[in-house]
Amino acid sequence: MTNNTELKKIVENTCEEKELVDTVLVIVEKIVALPKKKKFTIAKLIDYDPQKDIVDPLKQGTIKALVSKVCKKLGIQLTTIDKSFGGLAYNVTHRKDILKKPVRKCTACGYDKFFEIKIVDEEIKTALGVSPKKVKSYVCEKCGHIEFYMEKEM
Ligand SMILES: [Zn+2]
């Protein structure tokens, strides 16, 4: 089905459930092909037809989690846009976002682990004069130094 062996290897290394490898691979390939910022549901991506071939809710959740994991390894973040009631993972709308990697070492103390923080609208607007969606921020786990990153497409 695919000749992307590199991608297949990543999927195989991520999926402990070997029977899900092919399903996850198909979905990830479709996501990779999407333009960034594109909104999608897994159901629409794969023309999911519960009449034909039903995937139970638990399995949908597992597949979704694996897809997210693989995407993260590829530098793609699946941002949840809405959680529809009923909670079927295939029907949740996601947006394809590109992960921004923090700098390797903290410029203040040299430590190499960061966590990402979200800043509320008003604060970011006051401080930087730009929309919060266009700024990512990371905090050094050791000293608390904050790094800000602007997204490119502005
Ligand atoms: Zn630091």
Image (cartoon, helix red, strand yellow):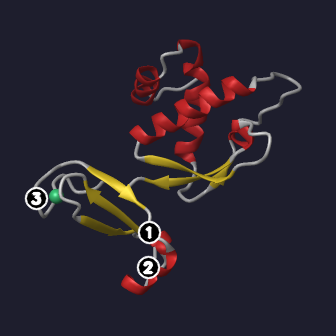
Looking at the rendered structure, the kind of residue marked 3 is Cys
Relative depth, front residue between 19 and 30: 19
Residue in the picture at 39% in, 28% down:
6
| Callout 1 amino acid | Ile
Please report whichever mark, 3 or 2, sits nearer to the chain's N-terminal start: 3
Identity of the residue drawn at 46% across and 34% down: 70
Q: Residue at x 52, y 44 (%)?
A: 32
- The disc, 1 or 3, on the residue closer to the chain's N-terminal end is 3
Identify residue for label 1: 119
The percent position of residue 123, horizontal first and vertical second, equals 44, 79
Residue 147 pos. (x, y %) = 27, 66
Left or right, residue 88 beside residue 146: right
Q: Residue sitting at 83 percent across and 31 percent down?
A: 49
Determine contact: label 2, label 1, CB under 8 Å: yes
Is 11 on the left-hand or right-hand side of 43?
A: left
Queried on whether the Cβ of the residue with tag 3 lies below 8 angstroms from ligand 1, the answer reads yes
Name the residue carrying label 2: 123
Callout 2, which amino acid? Glu
Q: How many marks?
A: 3
Q: Position of residue 17 (x, y in %)?
A: 53, 15
